[in-house]
Image (spheres, coloured by chain):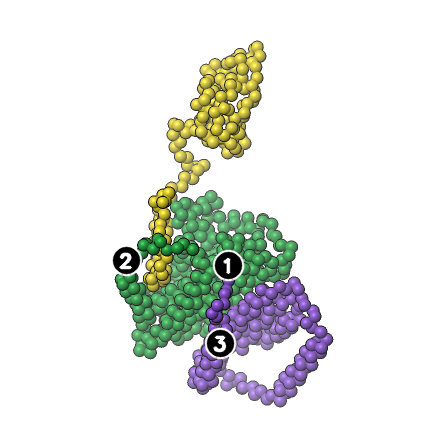
Chain colours: A purple, B green, C yellow
Amino acid sequence: MPITADKIWYILTALTLISALAVILVRNPMYSVLSLVLTFFLLSCHYFLLNAQFLGVVNMIVYAGAIMVLFLFVVMFLNLREYREETKNNLTKIGAFVMGLAILGAIIASIRRLQYPMPPSEQFNIKTGYVETLGDLLFRDYLLPFELVTVLFFIAMVGAIIIGKREKGERHF
Amino acid sequence: MDIFWIKAIIVLVIFGLSLVVAMYSTWAERKVAGYMQDRPGPNRAGWGGLLQPLADAGKMFFKEDFIPAQANKWLFIAGPCLAMLTALLSSAVVPFGDTIIVGSDEVQVQGIEVNIGILWVFGIVSLGVYGVMVGGWASNNKFSLLGAIRAASQNISYELAMGLSLIAIIMMTGSLSVRDIINTQHGGSWNLLYQPLGFIIFLTCAFAECNRTPFDLPECEAELIGGYHTEYSSMKLGFYLFAEYINMFVSSCVVSALYFGGFNYPFMDKVAEALGTDATGHNIATAIGFGVFFAKALFFVFFFMWVRWTLPRFRYDQLMNLGWKSLIPLAILNIVVTGIGLMFEIRWFSWVAVILIVGVALVQAALKPKAARGILEAAPVR
Amino acid sequence: MQLTNRSKKIDKSEMSLAERMYLPAIASGMAITLKHFFKKKPTINYPEQKRYLGPVFRGHHILKKDEAGRERCTACGLCAVACPAEAISMVAAERKSGEEHLYREEKYAAVYEINMLRCIFCGFCEEACPKQAIYLRHDEFVPVFMSRER
């Protein structure tokens, strides 16, 4: 039985959905964070399957490797034994349900209208997802948005440093 | 023979080799430690103690496999597995040699050749911290937790400097593929000669990423008992230690591929010419290149041990200061200087940064009065 | 006032750039360890290689017999008094008629014990003994295991 890309896609998608559902269904926040890491990893695998290697690896480094480590960091500091039920009364539950339904409706409505043109397979360039193509696009066609995003990141970084800076008279142990 | 099976054999050989090298690294570590401390090291099991790794493995397997009552059982088991998995994944893109010709096919001696190779290593290394974190947290022990947190923050901090030092190499090569990086170093133009500062930063960060001394604060015995593996015993502990040695081997391979020309060696063209261009000659030339690459990697494994048995451990604030306040600015300086060099097509331009720093240091040492040392005994001792 | 003159004065002034780079210091340290790496090892692999012990070495205790094969010890207790570690204890007994070929004097040690966990191998018992009965062998260690062979 030959292993084809669409079979791998089905398996990967099933795994991704399971781990993504586990993020919200599992009660232990530690398990939630870890299944979120798994979800990001599987999403990276989806990128690899689409031959978008650079995007996949960057997704892995940035989300699974850096951001989720910080999430885990925070969760590890909390005392997980005390699960506080009282923050979730019926009103918040109903509110969350309604909000969720509204977002689901919005997504379905927008996807239903979407006309996604499939590129003809003979014109498909295998190097579309490669870093060279991506670099060409970013630094030629989309240079201004790219630079604006870097400015945004720079501002965010300066802000983070100012927030984290030790103030006069403040003591750290 | 089908190309699929050749590739499968190559992958299996690389997998087996990294395991065997890691196994004998444990022996070599103890031997090197012994020799540097004027003693012979393990020499009872087999000739020169060569069977010591087997004896250790036997011991590890027969020890009691203990899981603390208050530990999170599944995550406690998952920790060492994750550490081992991520350690083994990263060697997939390291090119161990040139190509071999089997029949009409030319196969690369490498797990997979992808055009983002070095980023793959980087991504897997950044995932590697989960094994330590999960294990440390699941032990339900304050010392383990502290070790895990130290490991996490240390890895994140040093990944930045490591990535920035890599960017200079990538700028010079114009490719993320490790094979391309090696091929541009063909003919003795090793990246070490053009990127001295980047090499030092990368090497330092490699030590920190492998949790090796002087950066082994996650398992710092003096402060944290055993750090993240305090509660571990038997083969689970063995997996953690083994993963460390595999990481060490892979990072040695990466260092020798990026900065020391990988499987390139001086006069390799003449050797290849002498061996002929038919399949056998080509394969022998590849085998020599493989041996050269291996020798370089093993030298760096030795270097890791050499440093471990020479340097004391950093203090945690010193570690953070070194990472954030020294290595990252230096790496950015290196990128800028390399960029200027590339603009004017002067490849060795990043030596300017090194010369600048050394010059400032020398001037400062010359200007500083020598008598200033050692007369401050009246200073209050805090 | 210092007990020894070996203590070093600590310099707490700010480090210069060369010192803050750590690299020169690291290189010199690694040169030292590499020098030791190639040094000849002073280790003696014990069971295979044995060190020359010398004629005054104090090793395994024995109670000697005289030329006729009779025990010399009379259980006088001087060795026990001399012992700084109080390791020696003994039970004296009187010689019966017909045992003259076994014991030289009228009194002998029925039990003579040296607690090997306490013994410090000072050899004072040997010096104190008026009959030259106890002797510390110069060519043999105390057996490591419980064996009483030979």
**Residues packed near mark 3 inside 10 Å, few (<14), some (14 to 19) or many (20 plus):** few
Who's the residue at 50% across and 65% down the image? A171
Question: In the rendered image of this protein, does residue C35 appear above or below residue A115?
Answer: above
Element assignment for label 3: helix
Indicate which disc residue B218 carries: 1
Name of the residue lying farthest toward the top? C97
Which of discs 1 and 3 lies nearer the camera? The answer is 3
Q: Residue C124 is drawn in which quadrant?
A: top left
Query: Which percent across, then down, holds residue B19?
Result: 49, 58
Q: Are marks 1 and 3 on the same chain?
A: no
Who's the residue at 37% across and 43% down the image? C3
Residue at mark 3 = A159
Residue at mark 2 = B370
Who's the residue at 71% across and 77% down the image? A91
**Residues packed near mark 2 inside 10 Å, few (<14), some (14 to 19) or many (20 plus):** few
Which of discs 3 and 2 lies nearer the camera? The answer is 2
Task: Return the chain for callout 1.
Answer: B
Question: Can the viewer see residue A147?
Answer: yes
Query: Which percent across, then down, holds residue C24?
Result: 33, 59
How far apart, in angstroms, are the residues tagged by discs 3 and 2?
A: 44 Å
Whether residue C62 sits left or right of residue A115 in the image: it is left
Element assignment for label 2: helix
Query: Which percent across, then down, holds residue C85?
Result: 50, 30
Q: Quadrant of the N terminus of chain C?
A: top left
How far apart, in angstroms, are the residues tagged by discs 1 and 2?
A: 39 Å
